[in-house]
Image (cartoon, rainbow, N blue to C red):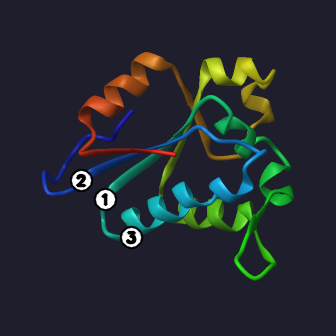
């Protein structure tokens, strides 16, 4: 699922998001870090498994508010849009869609579905794998 590596100096960073709607305080960090990594000219992807697909369900990014110390916060959509603008790829785990009764039609635009073998291949070829 990684793009063909044209420049050996480009690093590949794979983030794994396992948390969903019940923990909004854990929802924005993978997007924030992935956006920063992409801004540093790395190839970056986030893989959503277990409860992670809940964050990508249509309507959820607008409803989930990422809390901020001192009150307030931003909608998760803000962080997703920043990541997408930096060409961060969003992959969802096919079995995790089934776990929550989702189909790809339930996902926001820009999400791609992969299975376990493709994820393992990405992890093997990544320069860094970071899990949340």
Q: Position of residue 8 (x, y in %)?
A: 13, 51
Q: Which residue is mark 1?
A: 42
Say left or right for 90 vs 41. Answer: right
Mark sitting on residue 39? 3
Mark 1 / mark 2, whichever is N-terminal: 2
Say if 16 sits above or below 38 in the image.
above
Residue 54 falls in image quadrant: top right
Mark sitting on residue 11? 2
Q: Are marks 3 and 1 in contact (CB under 8 Å)?
A: no
Q: CA distance from mark 3 to mark 1?
A: 7 Å
Say if 122 sits above or below 21 in the image.
above
Q: Quadrant of the N terminus?
A: top left
Q: Are marks 1 and 2 in contact (CB under 8 Å)?
A: yes
The 10 Å Cα crowd at callout 2, few under 14, some 14 to 19, many 20 or more, is some
Q: CA distance from mark 1 to mark 2?
A: 5 Å
Secondary structure found at label 2: loop
Residue 96 falls in image quadrant: top right
């Amino acid at each position: 699922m990684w793009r063909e590596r044209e420049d050996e100096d480009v690093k590949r960073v794979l983030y794994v998001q396992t948390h969903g709607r019940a923990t909004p305080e854990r929802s924005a960090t993978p997007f924030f870090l992935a956006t920063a990594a992409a801004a540093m000219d790395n190839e970056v992807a986030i893989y959503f498994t277990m409860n992670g697909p809940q964050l990508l369900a249509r309507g959820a990014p607008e409803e989930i508010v990422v809390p901020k110390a001192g009150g307030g916060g931003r909608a998760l959509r803000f962080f997703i849009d920043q990541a997408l603008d930096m060409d961060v790829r969003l992959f969802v785990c096919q079995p995790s869609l089934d776990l929550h009764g989702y189909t790809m039609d339930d996902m926001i635009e820009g999400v791609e579905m992969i299975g376990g073998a493709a994820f393992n291949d990405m992890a093997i070829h990544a320069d860094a794998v970071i899990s949340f």
